[in-house]
Image (tube, rainbow, N blue to C red):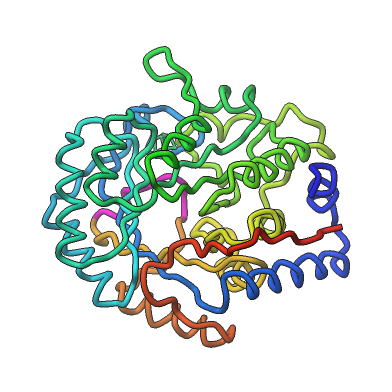
């Protein structure tokens, strides 16, 4: 698919024409990754962060937030809960917390693998090669690092350099793949200053990187962040709107560009459309859900954007609700780790 074709889809507003895109994405999803929906237990184990990304509520500069870091025992309890609920993977997520020793996280990974056998996905920011190697050797299977936008000017505007260095997340992703991780990335949709052509370039890049996992969600302004006070420099016809339908388009196009990828219907999507965000995501290309199993006392402090979806319910209640949702869609919960299924021959699906 060319960038121009992708951009044309992103600009499409005719519901009848868009229904073709939804159907194609759903068909490709069914043919490549099947009817299983993999449930990954999300553990937000620390909200400390060294960085100051201008859109993020847990940025270092947000002094209004109480900070926490979970203990090894608390993380292991969550992993045991994930196993009891039948999940195949836990996702260990934090801000770019550079205060915990890399060896500590390596030990946590080993203990989770030893006690539960679950697959472990890390989402802990930009890290040194030494740390990545250490965690891979400890048994971590996957790594998520969203590049957020492939437009370097926009990227630098919303990601102030850390210690004078602007990171190269694409190079980091390539390194992770060399180290043997499955790699995941993604973008925010509707960042002020994000054009249709730049979002089309992001989706093309998913294909070039041959991502194993793709996570996308709408930009949701957080009132305690600088970006929430910024207006787009682009004219209205060029600025990508941060609405849920744009996110469905990106999910569907991601499925066509990377047919075998694991693609979640994200929490951000459920936040902007609580009634049917997840269901529509799953019907338009997604095949993963990441239920949040972080203890309730910490969950509200992982405040990356306001109103994060999830009514006040226990993990068991959330699980029952998700099972009912899957049943209503004619889908079933995935069994096992839910790693990327690689076909022998690369698929090619027309989109035009
Ligand atoms: S987006 Fe990630 S790295 Fe940036 S401030 Fe938020 S948690 Fe930290």
- Residue 19 vs residue 141, the one in the foreground: 141
**What residue do we see at 31% from left, 39% from top?**
65
Q: Return the residue found at the far top.
A: 164
**What residue do we see at 88% from left, 62% from top?**
14
Q: Which x, y percent locates residue 9?
A: 82, 53
Q: Is residue 262 left or right of residue 116?
A: right
- Residue 76 vs residue 293, the one in the foreground: 76
**What residue do we see at 79% from left, 42% from top?**
3
Q: How many marks?
A: 0
Q: Is residue 299 left or right of residue 264?
A: left
Quadrant hosting residue 60: top left
Q: Which x, y percent locates residue 171?
A: 50, 30
Q: Quadrant of ligand 1?
A: top left
The verdict on residue 86 being magenta is no
**What residue do we see at 18% from left, 49% from top?**
70
Q: Which x, y percent locates residue 101?
A: 17, 34
The verdict on residue 306 being magenta is yes
Q: Is residue 119 left or right of residue 27?
A: left
Reply above or below: 305 against 175. Answer: below
Q: Which x, y percent locates residue 85?
A: 29, 77
Reply above or below: 39 against 180. Answer: below
Q: Is residue 22 left or right of residue 216?
A: right
> Which quarter of the image is occupied by the C terminus?
bottom right
Q: Return the residue found at the far front.
A: 344
Is the stretch drawn in magenta largely helix, strand or loop?
A: loop
Reply above or below: 146 against 111. Answer: above
Q: Which region of the structure is painted magenta?
A: 298-307
């Amino acid at each position: 698919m060319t960038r121009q074709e992708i951009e044309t889809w992103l600009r499409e507003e005719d519901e009848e024409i868009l229904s073709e895109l939804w159907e194609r994405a759903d068909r490709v999803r069914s043919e490549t990754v099947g009817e299983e929906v993999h449930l990954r237990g999300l553990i937000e184990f620390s909200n400390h962060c060294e960085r100051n990304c201008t859109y993020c509520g847990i940025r270092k500069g947000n002094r209004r937030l109480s900070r926490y870091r979970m203990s090894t025992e608390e993380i292991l309890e969550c992993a045991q809960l994930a196993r009891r609920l039948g999940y195949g993977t836990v996702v260990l997520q934090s801000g770019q917390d550079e205060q915990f020793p890399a060896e500590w996280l390596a030990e946590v990974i080993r203990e989770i693998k030893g006690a539960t056998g679950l697959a472990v996905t890390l989402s802990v920011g930009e890290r040194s090669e030494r740390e990545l190697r250490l965690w891979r050797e400890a048994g971590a299977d996957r790594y998520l690092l969203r590049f957020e936008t492939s437009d370097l000017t926009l990227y630098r505007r919303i990601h102030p350099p850390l210690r004078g260095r602007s990171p190269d997340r694409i190079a980091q992703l390539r390194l992770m793949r060399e180290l043997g991780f499955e790699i995941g990335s993604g973008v925010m949709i509707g960042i002020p200053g994000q054009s249709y052509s730049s979002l089309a370039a992001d989706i093309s890049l998913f294909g070039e990187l041959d991502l194993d996992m793709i996570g996308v969600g709408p930009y949701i302004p957080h009132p305690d962040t600088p970006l929430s006070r910024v207006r787009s420099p682009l004219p209205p016809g060029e600025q990508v709107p941060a609405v849920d339908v744009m996110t469905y388009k990106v999910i569907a196009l991601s499925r066509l560009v990377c047919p075998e990828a694991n693609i979640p219907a994200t929490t951000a999507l459920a936040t902007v459309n609580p009634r049917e965000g997840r269901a529509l995501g799953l019907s338009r290309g997604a095949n993963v859900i990441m239920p949040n199993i972080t203890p309730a006392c910490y969950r509200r402090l992982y405040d990356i954007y306001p109103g994060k979806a999830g009514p006040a319910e226990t993990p068991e209640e959330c699980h029952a609700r998700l099972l009912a949702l899957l049943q209503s869609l004619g889908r079933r919960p995935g069994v096992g780790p839910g790693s990327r299924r690689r076909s022998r021959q690369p698929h090619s699906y027309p989109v035009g």
